[in-house]
Amino acid sequence: MDIKVNKKLGLKERYNLMTRDLAWTPTYQAFKDVYPYMQYEGIKIHDWDKFEDPFRMTMDAYWKYQAEKERKLYAIIDAFTQNNGHLGVTDARYINTLKLFLTGVSPLEYMAHRGFAHVGRAFPGAGPRVACLMQSLDEIRHAQTQIHSMSNYNKHYNGFQNWRHQHDRVWYLSVPKSFFDDAITAGPFEFMIAIGFAFEYVLTNLLFVPFISGAAYNGDMGAMAFGFSAQSDESRHMTLGLEIIKFILEQDPDNLPIVQHWIDKWFWRGYRVLTLVAMMMDYMLPKRVMSWKEAWEIYAEQNGGALFADLARYGVKAPAGLAQACKDKDHLSHQAWNVFYNYAAAAPFHTWAPSEADMKWLSEKYPDTFDKYYRPLWEHYAKEQKEGRRFYNTTLPMLCQTCQIPMFFTEPDDPTKVAYRESDYKGEKYHFCSDGCKNIFDHEPEKYIQSWLPVHQIYQGNCFCPDVDPSKPDFNPLAEVLRWYKITWGEDNLDYADSPDKKNFEQWRVQATGN
Amino acid sequence: MQIDLRTVSITPLRQTFNHIADRLGADKAASRYIEATMDVQANANFHYRPTWDPAHELHDTARTQLVMKDWYALKDPRQLYYGNYTQARARMQETAEADFMFVETRGLTERYDAATRRIALDFYLPLRHVAWGANMNGASMCAYGYGTAITQPCLYAGMDQLGVAQYLSRLGLLLGDQGDLEAAKHAWLESPVWQGLRRLVEDTWVMQDWFELFVAQNVALDGLLFGLAYKEVDAVLTDKAGPTVSMLTRFQAEWFEDAKKWVDAVIKVAAAESADNQALLSRWYTAWRDRAAGALRPVAAIALAQAGQGALERVTAALDARMSKAGLTV
C-alpha cells in the first residue's frame, strides 16, 4: 500500500474512510429506485456493513500494481512476438487449444467485466460494490490481454480471425456464451453465486489452470505470461466469491434454500462448460499436464470436498450433480472429442484421431474405460482415414435445451446408452442431456425456452447469409451455414493432418532453425 | 548511425482479425487499442432477456434515446485500453504521491493558514461524496451502455472518480483529521448549502437513459465542478495561502484535463451523427448545465463568498465554449 498509515488510524479504519464512509443512504430518491434489483430474488440482507472486505486496496495502489504487471506482461508478449515464439511450441496441434480459448473463453472474460459493472452498480453495500467494480476492471484486463497475446497467432494461423463473429453464432460456442448470458441475465445475487462463487471459486482450477498449465507445458510463453500475470487477480476474485457467499448465508436463514439451488444449478452449468476443457486436456495438448480425470480428482473431489465440508456449518450441501460428475470423469473427454472429430467440418479449429502413443497414454490414464469403450472407435476412424475416408458427420445433432451441448452424454451407469431427458411445457417438448439440465429448465422454463439453439436456428433458416438462394438446384445448406459462420473450407476446419496450419508450421520451423 | 539487427522473417497470413480489417478497410496492422476495443462486446443472438430488465436485450441500443448507426464511432481519442490506462494513472498517482509526501515531510500543512484551511476543508471534503456518486454512475454507464468503445472509458472514469474520492479523503486527513471528514459528511447530508448538489447526485442515480447520464455526469456536473474546484477555488486558495492545496489536488486537475479530451470527442461525434442527436444532446446539456450550476452556486460561495457567482459564470462560459465547439447549441 502506498498510503502512509496515519498514526491515529488503523489500516482497516483508514480503508473504511476511503470506501464505505463515502457512501450514504439516499433521501431525495427512494432506496428502492436507486437500488431497484435488490428485492426480486428473495435474498434478505439486513446489514451490508457486515461484509468483510477481502482485500483493502485503494485505487492508487491498484493502478500502481496493475500497471507494473501490465508492463512486464507486454514486454514478454513483445519479445515472444519478435522472436517468432509461436514456432517454439511443441507442435501446431497445440495452437488449436488457443483457438478454443479465444473464441470460447475470452468473450466470457469481457462479459464478466460488464456483469461485475452491473452488480457493482446494483449492490447498495459499499464494500462489495468496490470489490465488484475492481473485478470488473480486472476482467476487461483479462479479455484484452488474451486478445493481445493471441493477436500474433492470428497473424500466422487460421481459426482466430473471426472470434467475435463466431462466438455469437457457431454451434458449440453457444455453450460458453449461453452459460454467461444465463448468469448475467439472472439477478445480481445469483450472478455472484454463479460467477463469483461457483465459477471463480469452485471451477477456476479446472478451466483457467489447465489452459495456462497447458501453455507452459507446450512452450507457449505468450499465453503462459497472461495466465501467470492474471494469477493474483484471480486469487482476489476467488476471495471475493467466498466472502460474498458467506455474507449472504450469514445475513438470513431464509437465504439458504435459494443459495443451495443456485449452487446446484451453477455447479452443473459450469461443469457442462468444462466438457470443452476435458477434451482439451486429454486430446488436444501434444504434451499433457495431467488427465481430466486426475484434475477432477484433485480439484473437484478433494479441494471441492474440503470446501463444501467447510460450508456445511452454514447448512450448505455439496452440489446435487457432483456424484454424477464424478462418475462421468472416465468418459467425458473421450465422448466430447469424438463429437468434435465428427463435426470437424463445422468448427473453426482442427481435430485429429489420437496417435498410437496418445492412445497408450490414454489407456494408462483411463484403465477402466479407454481400451474397452473408446480405443476401438479411434482405431476404426484411423483405419478409415488411412484408406482415404476421413469421417465427417454432415447431419445436425440434437442439442440440450439448457447447456446446448449435443446430446452425446451417456447414462451415468451405462456408458453404452445415450442419456435423454425431456419436459413438456406449454404444449412443446424440450430435450435435455441430463437430470441436471432438466432440473434447471423445470425450475425456470420461461428463461430456457428463450435459448438461441444453433441447430434449431439453422433449421429455421436463420443461419444463412442474406444473399442465399435455397431454391437453386445446387443449394448446399451445410456449406451455406459455414459461409455464414465465416469458416473458410479447408483452411479453418477439417482434420489437422491436411491443414495449412500444419504445413506452414513445419515449413516455418525449418526456415527458422535450418539454413 | 543505424545498426541493423536481423530476425528470421516469416510472412504472416494476415495482419489482424477480420472484424478489425473490415473496420480499417484493409488487412493492415492494428493498434492494441483497436484490437482490444472494436466489436469486443457481443451484439447478436443473446440467449435470454435480463430478469432485471425484461424490456431489453442484454446489450441493447434502446437503453438511450440517442441513435448511432455505429456505436464504435464513439472512440476514445486517448486510445485507452486497460494496459495504457493503468500505466497512465500509475504515473499520475506517482506524481500525486510525491506531492503528498512533499507537503507532509516539509510540514506544509502545519504552517498552512488556519482560515484558508477551514475553507479548504469545508469546500473540498464533501466533494468526496460527489465523486462517490460519479463512481456509481460510471459503473452504470459501463453496465448499461452500448459498445466497448464507450463503455470501457466510462468504467475507467468511474474508477478514476473513486480515486478522486480517496485523494480528497487523504487531503482531509492531512489537512485536518477524521473529525473533519465526519463533519463534512454531516454537512453533505444536512447542511442546506449542499442539499441542491446532493439532490442532483441522487437524481442522476435513478436516470434511465445512460447517455443522458453521460451528459449529466461527465459533461455538465464534472465540467462545472472540476472547473470550479480545481481552477477557480484553487487559484484563490493559492493566492491566500500558497500552493499546498494545489499540490494535494493535482491528480484531480490533471485528470480533468485528460477526461475533457475524451468527453468532448464523444459529444462531437454523437452530435455530428444527426440533427436529432444534436437537438437531443443540446437539450440534455442545457438542462443539466443549468441544474448543476444552480446546485453549485451555494457551494461556490463556501470558498469564494460573493466572488463565487463570477467564478461559476466563468466555468459555465468555458463549458459552453467546449460544447459549442463540439457542435451543441448552448
Image (cartoon, coloured by chain):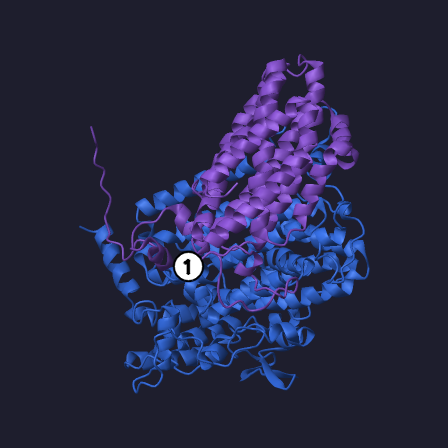
Chain colours: A blue, B purple
Residue A444 is left or right of residue B280, and the answer is: right
According to the picture, the residue beneath numbered tag 1 turns out to be: A98
Q: Position of residue A186 (x, y in %)?
A: 64, 63
Which residue reaches farthest left? A515
Tell me the residue at 41%/71% (across/down).
A359
Amino acid type of the residue tagged 1 in the rendering: Leu
A153 above or below A233?
Answer: below
Q: Position of residue A115 (x, y in %)?
A: 59, 55
Chain under disc 1? A
Which residue reaches farthest top? B111
Q: Quadrant of residue A428?
A: bottom right
Query: Tag count in the figure?
Result: 1
Viewer-proximal residue, B147 or A322? B147
B44 above or below B239?
Answer: below
Residue A213 appears in the picture as rendered: no
Residue B6 is left or right of residue A439, and the answer is: left
Q: Quadrant of residue A471?
A: bottom left
Viewer-proximal residue, B94 or A41? A41
A60 above or below A372?
Answer: above
Tell me the residue at 75%/26% (across/down).
B180
Q: Position of residue A314 (x, y in %)?
A: 78, 58
Q: Residues within 10 Å of mark 1 (few under 14, many from 20)?
A: many
A281 above or below A472?
Answer: above
Q: Secondary structure at mark 1?
A: helix
Residue A176 is left or right of residue B310, and the answer is: left
Viewer-proximal residue, B189 or A161? B189
Residue A153 appears in the picture as rendered: yes
Residue A403 is left or right of residue B172, and the answer is: left
Tell me the residue at 34%/49% (across/down).
B30
